[in-house]
Image: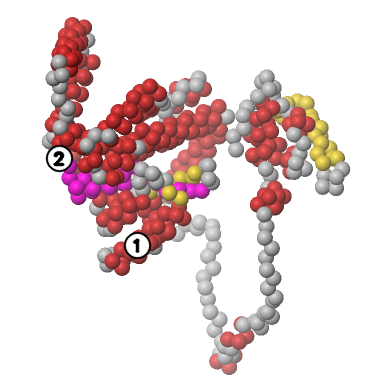
Amino acid sequence: MAVVSQFLALLHVRESDVAWRLLRAKHASLVMAVLDAHFTEQDRRIPVPELESMVDADIEELRFKADADFPHSGHGACEQWRRDGYLVRRPLKQQRVETYELSAGALAAIAYAKQLARPRRSATQSRMTLIVDAIESLAIASNPDAEVRRRALLDERARIDSQLEALDAGDYEVISDDSGLEALSEIVSLLSEIPKDFAHVRHDFETINKSLYETIIGYEEGYRDVVENIFAGVDEISQSPSGKSFGGFYALLRDAELIEALQDNVDAIMDTGFADALTPPEKRLFRGMIAALLDQSKEVNDVKTSFAQGLRRFVQSQDYRREQLLKKTIDQALAVAHKLESHPAPYRSVGPELELTSIAIAPLSRWRLYNPRDVFADPLPEMPLHGAKSVSLAELLAQAREVEVDFDELAENVNGLLGNDGVSPSIADVLEAHPATQGIASVIGLLSLAATYGRATDKKQTVRWEAEEGCTRQTTIEGFEFYREIFV
């Protein structure tokens, strides 16, 4: 029974796990070599066009020098790898571009393959010491007996006192280069695993976020508790096991005193002789450890925060009720369709008519030879070409504002008035404080925002704007007021 359950579990992993899929792919060596060459600690996210260009050059070089048989171009390869789950494509809001980054499965597969190509010694003294110390600390921390903890502290104090006496007597020994290099290599090995751990945590947050949406929309068990908790301000993602684990890790990184001491220790170790034996990539990894940890942890925390804020807006805006009704309607339609599908008669008319293609039958005397010239038009006369004049960025922005409503400007105007002593400004108040820079388009844009982020009032409003002719126009609209911050 254990064999069957284990077989089924591994069969499911083989079909669903990205790392396993990459390791058994036909071109696994090429894929991992190309991706590992470009995604480094400094370049964890690469713009889509840039990566496609680099992959295209790599494929050409592999075909020429290594006789690699790979059917895709750079663009096709990146798209295929995205569909296979090796790459994740996400927008980069600061630059308004899309980027690629390695998925958690791809990171795990590449790390495993590199370990096979360059195996590390696992049975080392430093690793055993690390295991023994961790077990001892856990055993003491989990023991409720105060006497056990007292004895452990007394033993630790005696050991420290003994070391201090030996130090005063000048009897101490600096770690040898071999032992120091062994311990430092173990630390670097642990550091190399951290990007993969961050990717797994981010994937866990995405899964939890999706599960919460499905629970709310699908009326699943406990959805009322989830909605009530979100209304009460509870961050469901942070309260999950992955969220709590990452929260403790992130809290340590935000301890300025701890980080400062850690940086001093890193600098001291890099000044030793045995640190010179590290490879250049290992030196960069160890020296840039703190900056990389802070950068990657902040990115994961921002993802967690954005998920929590999106879920809170989804619930507090009552949008979840509309999604619940939509899902309920779809489920009912699918149930009716399934019921009708199970009892169709082969001769039953379904309504639609299909006109079959046909050919007219005529005697040979009516046939005419096909002249291809009849379907070609006369060539167009040559048109004179005029050089295009240069256009500045300001002119392009002005043209864009003529055809699109500047919702970013309107949202900023509304949010600026919301911060004044809790006032709920109306559309007329917004236009009085910030005149309509786009004329009637600004009024229409505010009405559109009010339908989503505002609430209706009984009092009608008179709004004014300046038309293109230079005259002031006004009209009366339904009353709306804004009561919450706008996110566009």
| Dot 1: element | helix
Q: Quadrant of residue 364?
A: bottom right
Residue at image point 62% right, 82% down: 376
Q: Indicate whether residue 102 is drawn in magenta.
A: yes
Whether residue 345 is situated above or below residue 205 in the rendered picture: below
Disc sitting over residue 59 in the figure:
1
Residue at image point 28% right, 66% down: 65
Disc sitting over residue 121 in the figure:
2
Near mark 1 (Cα within 10 A), the count class, few <14, some 14-19 or many ≥20, is many
| Dot 2: element | loop
State the residue lying farthest toward the right: 471
Measured Cα–Cα span from mark 1 to mark 2: 34 Å
Whether residue 349 is situated above or below residue 475 in the rendered picture: below
Mark 1 is on which residue type? Ile
Whether residue 460 is situated above or below residue 19 in the rendered picture: above
| Magenta region | 97-121
Residue at image point 29% right, 54% down: 33
State the image coordinates of residue 95 (x, y, percent, origin top left): 53, 45
Mark 2 is on which residue type? Arg
| Residue 270 seen anywhere in this rendered image of the structure | yes
State the residue lying farthest toward the bottom: 365
Give the side of residue 488 with respect to residue 258, left or right. Answer: right
